[in-house]
Amino acid sequence: VDGNASRAAGSAEAAKQGLEKRPTLAHAGNSAWLTAGIIIADVVGAGVLSMPMAIAKFGWVLGGLLVVVLLAMNVHISIVLWRCKMHCPEATTYMELMDSAFKQAPKSHRIFMKWITGLSQYSFMIGVLGVYGLSWGKGFGMMAYEARVCMPVLILLGFALLAPFHGSARNMGSWQSLVWLNILTLLGAVVIPLAYMMAEGQASIMPEGSQVYAFAPLEVRQVFAGL
């Protein structure tokens, strides 16, 4: 018994020394700053351009409260999604995550949830690409407003410019410079209008007959437009 205990202790010590001598692998993920930049660029995105209109539809008090409520919902959903990922570490896509999360459910339910997740995800991605395509198409048109080029051509031009970056990226941090450029663009979209309003004054920029509401009078159409 003593011999077995000695051999076991020796094996444990050898294993410990082996672990200590093992070289430390560099972390393959993104840095904390880059991850924060990706989250900001992804969460804010083009939504910063539509936020003033949303606040105007609800009023500055009600609109501000809705922003806080939606922020809380976003944080809660992110935490739930992270817990699902920790429970199913083998999943690498949303469809795989849903399939793993419903592995105890009947097969028909699992297949349905897997494919409805994929349909929702890809429909959202196609919709976002459409919105972004219209955005950069209008942007190119404003920069070259004297050129007689139709909108579809400008949108295809934007896709052609982005294709090399998307085709060569293998993870979210492949093009770090584009992440920071995106954040600078978002800051410009916020700071430039504010600076212009400060320079020109409130009276010169408000449309004639417009009013500021803390709680705007709501209609069904107006609510959907604000959301």
Image: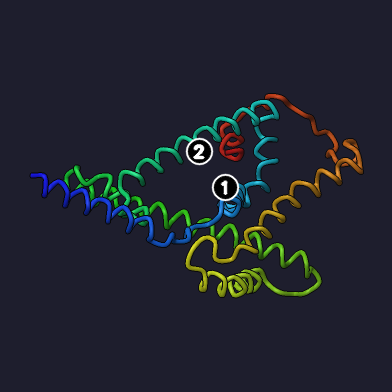
* Residue displayed at 70% across by 35% down: 56
Relative image position of residue 54 (x, y in whole percent) = 65, 38
Quadrant in which the C terminus is drawn: top right
Residue on which disc 2 sits: 74
Query: Who's the residue at 27% across and 51% down the image?
Result: 13
Q: Name the residue type under label 1.
A: Val
Is 207 displayed left or right of 163 in the figure? right
Res 121 → quadrant: bottom left
Q: Secondary structure at mark 2?
A: helix
For label 2, count other residues whose C-alpha is less than 10 Å away and answer few (under 14), some (14-19) or many (20+). few
**Residue identifier under label 1:** 43
The reply to whether residue 10 is visible in this rendering is yes
Callout 2 touching callout 1 (CB < 8 Å): yes
Q: Nearer the viewer, residue 168 or 67?
A: 168
In 3D space, how far apart are the residues under numbered discs 2 and 1 (Cα atoms)?
A: 10 Å
Q: Amino acid at mark 2?
A: Asn
Residue 36: x and y, percent?
A: 58, 49
Q: Is residue 148 left or right of residue 44?
A: right
- Asked whether, in this view, residue 168 is left or right of residue 10, the answer is right
Place of residue 100 in the rendered image (x, y in percent of width and height, measured from the top left)? 26, 49
For label 1, the crowd category at 10 Å Cα-Cα, with few meaning under 14, some 14 to 19 and many 20 or more, is: few
Vertical side of 217 occupied by 5: above or below: below
Q: How is the image coloured?
A: rainbow
Closer to the N terminus: mark 2 or mark 1? 1
Vertical relation: 159 (above or below) 53:
below
Q: Residue at x 68, y 48 (%)?
A: 49
Residue 115 in sight here:
no
- Residue 146 higher or lower than 1, as above or below: below
Quarter of the image holding residue 195? top right
- In the image: residue 11, left or right of residue 141: left
SS for callout 1 = helix
